[in-house]
Image (cartoon, rainbow, N blue to C red):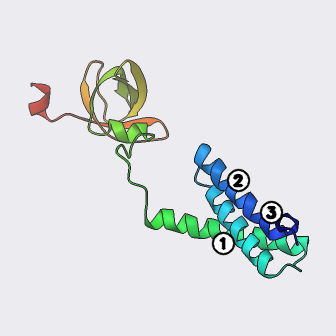
Amino acid sequence: MDWMDQAGVWWLLAAVLLAITELMIPGVFLVFLALAAAITGAITLFFPELSLGGQLIGFAAWSAVTVVIGKRWYRDYPVASSDPMLNDRIARLVGETVTVSQAIEGGVGRVRVGDGEWPAHGPDAPVATRVRVVGGRGGVLEVEPLPALETGV
């Protein structure tokens, strides 16, 4: 009997290819499919009479199981980052002092952040007033006036 005639070997080869693809194009998803393919391959080697339909159903079921386990793993053991707020621009601005560029009237205005401007909500403030970013939502910064000691008044 030739090894390449067994479906389980093909499943194991698919697992290896998926794992290699995961290493070349990291996305932390193909690894779960590679695990499912490896499990399906092992089961198919032990039960060679398993039909193609049964193999595909097994692969789909094991894919779901490995993805659920992986999702739970990453939730319970998050990957530490040297810059956890890398993709959260507003969180990176919290605590920064910015300048009002369009008067905040009725709680709405604009502030200058670096070389750009952001919409802002906060207490009324005239142009050129310095305010502190305290939060934000939906691309709009929440600001508050600086304490008197910080404004130089």
Which residue is nearer to you in this view: 83 or 139?
83
Q: Of the residues under marks 1 and 2, which one precedes in the sequence?
A: 2
Amino acid type of the residue tagged 1 in the rendering: Val
Amino acid type of the residue tagged 2 in the rendering: Leu
From mark 3 to mark 2, how far is it between C-alphas? Answer: 10 Å
Q: Residues within 10 Å of mark 3 (few under 14, many from 20)?
A: some
- In the displayed structure, 115 sits above or below 78; it is above
Q: Which mark is residue 65?
A: 1
The residue that mark 2 highlights is 17
The residue that mark 3 highlights is 10
Q: Which mark is residue 19?
A: none
1 or 2: mark nearer the eye: 2
3 or 1: mark nearer the eye: 3
From mark 3 to mark 1, how far is it between C-alphas? Answer: 21 Å
51 sits left or right of 104 in the view: right
Q: Residues within 10 Å of mark 1 (few under 14, many from 20)?
A: some
Q: Are marks 3 and 1 in contact (CB under 8 Å)?
A: no
Q: Of the residues under marks 3 and 2, which one precedes in the sequence?
A: 3
- Tell me residue 116's x, y (percent): 41, 20
Quarter occupied by residue 91: top left
Quarter occupied by residue 3: bottom right
Amino acid type of the residue tagged 3 in the rendering: Trp
- Tell me residue 36's x, y (percent): 69, 67
Q: Residues within 10 Å of mark 2 (few under 14, many from 20)?
A: some
Which residue is nearer to you in this view: 40 or 145?
40
